[in-house]
Image (cartoon, grey):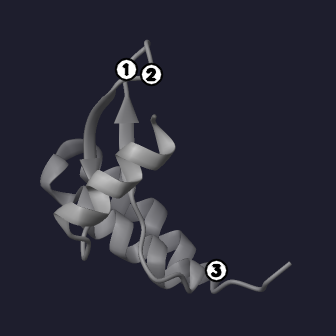
Amino acid sequence: MAAHDMSAAIETVAQAAAAIRDPDLWSEVARSAVRALGAGRATIGFLDARGDMLVRACPETDPDWHARYDAEMHA
């Protein structure tokens, strides 16, 4: 298992708490998670009870990536 920067993870949790009050901040939560995990990008999605995507926050991605994701993962 990889070691992760706990301070970056704590920052991500704090940003998620702030985003509950200000939905415009969810992209920042994704960026913070990327830093905390050492990943290239992150997507945060919210599903309704049926599993339909209500909203997706995906900073630093493009429309072609979303189309491919939807086609391959939700066919």
Q: Residue at x 77, y 86 (%)?
A: 3
Query: Answer yes or no: do the residues labelled 2 and 3 have beta carbons within 8 Å?
Result: no
What quarter of the picture does the C terminus occupy? top left
Cα distance between the residues tagged 1 and 2: 5 Å
Disc 3 on helix, strand or loop? helix
Tally the numbered discs: 3
Q: Position of residue 26 (x, y in %)?
A: 26, 56
Cα distance between the residues tagged 2 and 3: 31 Å
**Residue 41 vs residue 37, the one in the foreground:** 41
Look at the picture and state if 26 lies above or below 20.
below
Q: Position of residue 55 (x, y in %)?
A: 24, 39
- Looking at the image, residue 63 sits to the left or right of residue 74; the answer is left
Name the residue carrying label 3: 6
Name the residue carrying label 1: 48
Q: Position of residue 23 (x, y in %)?
A: 18, 47
Disc 1 on helix, strand or loop? loop
Disc 2 on helix, strand or loop? loop
Residue 51's disc is: 2
Query: Answer yes or no: do the residues labelled 1 and 2 have beta carbons within 8 Å?
Result: yes
